[in-house]
Amino acid sequence: MICRLTGLVGGIDEAGRGPLAGPVVSACVIWERAPEDKNGVTDSKLLTQKERVGLFSWIMDNALSVGIGMASREEIDEMNILKASLLSMERALLATGMEPDVVLVDGNRGLRNYPNARPVVRGDRRCFFMASASIVAKVIRDRAMDAYHRIYPNYNFKQNKGYPTREHKAAIREFGITPIHRVTFKGVREYCAG
């Protein structure tokens, strides 16, 4: 992995840009340095749920600070998913209560209000700092969708996490949409009244 940096380094990544329902969640994880034993930390999409949960606990125990930021379904529909994702990233950085020397942001955009934020394309696969944020964001968002599953069991959010699976799309056709569905997204907007 790249990213052999010194000083306080924050890694930022998001989870939940593609789903039809739920918030987008970002995490900022700040480290004094990358630990010698990175404990298998990599892009959350390459890990099983059990591996992610175990690494989430390890990151929470070992990172200097962790901040979580979210953008709601309403904000996603109001401003678009890209702007909402960047907003959730800024909120995650603010939630750490720290000002790292450098902030590495997974993707091709930095953060407008933070000149020390550097974008790194596919950073969650290439860099420990962003990979750790990827894991935290994914676990937090999955937990949120598990909670929504208890409120809206017909949609099986516990399994699909709001992504446009065949089962989820069939549930939208049968039961309509919930307050957490993103009404500007294809696959949802067709079922909105009016």
Image: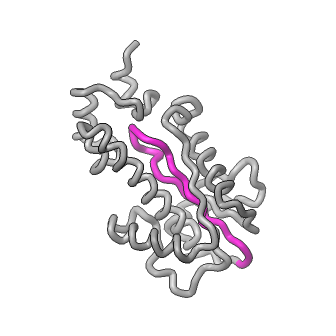
Image quarter (top left, top right, bottom left or bottom right) of the N terminus:
bottom right
Colour convention: one colour
Q: Residue at x 49, y 57 (%)?
A: 137
Residue with the most extreme top position = 194
x%, y% of residue 136?
Answer: 49, 62
Query: At x 67% / y 77%, what residue is drawn?
Result: 32
The answer to which quarter of the image holds residue 68 is bottom right
Q: Position of residue 3 (x, y in %)?
A: 63, 74
In the rendered structure, the answer to whether residue 150 lies left or right of residue 38 reads left
The vertical placement of 25 against 32, above or below, is above
| Image position of 132 with respect to 113: above or below | below
Residue 107 position within the rendered picture, expressed as x and y whole percent measured from the top left: 58, 55
**Can residue 12 be seen by looking at this rendering?**
no
* Residue extending farthest bottom: 36
Task: Tell me the quadrant of the picture where the C terminus can be found.
Answer: top left
Tell me where residue 91 appears, x and y as whole percent.
64, 50
Q: How many marks?
A: 0
Please give the range of residues in magenta. Answer: 6-29
Q: Is residue 118 left or right of residue 144?
A: right
> To which quarter of the image does residue 78 belong?
top right
In the picture shown, does residue 152 fall above or below 175?
below
Q: Can see residue 135?
A: yes
Residue drawn at (45%, 48%) of the image: 16
Magenta span has 140?
no
The answer to whether residue 172 is above or below residue 115 is above
Write the residue at 40% across / 25% down.
189
On screen, residue 75 versus residue 111, left or right, reads left
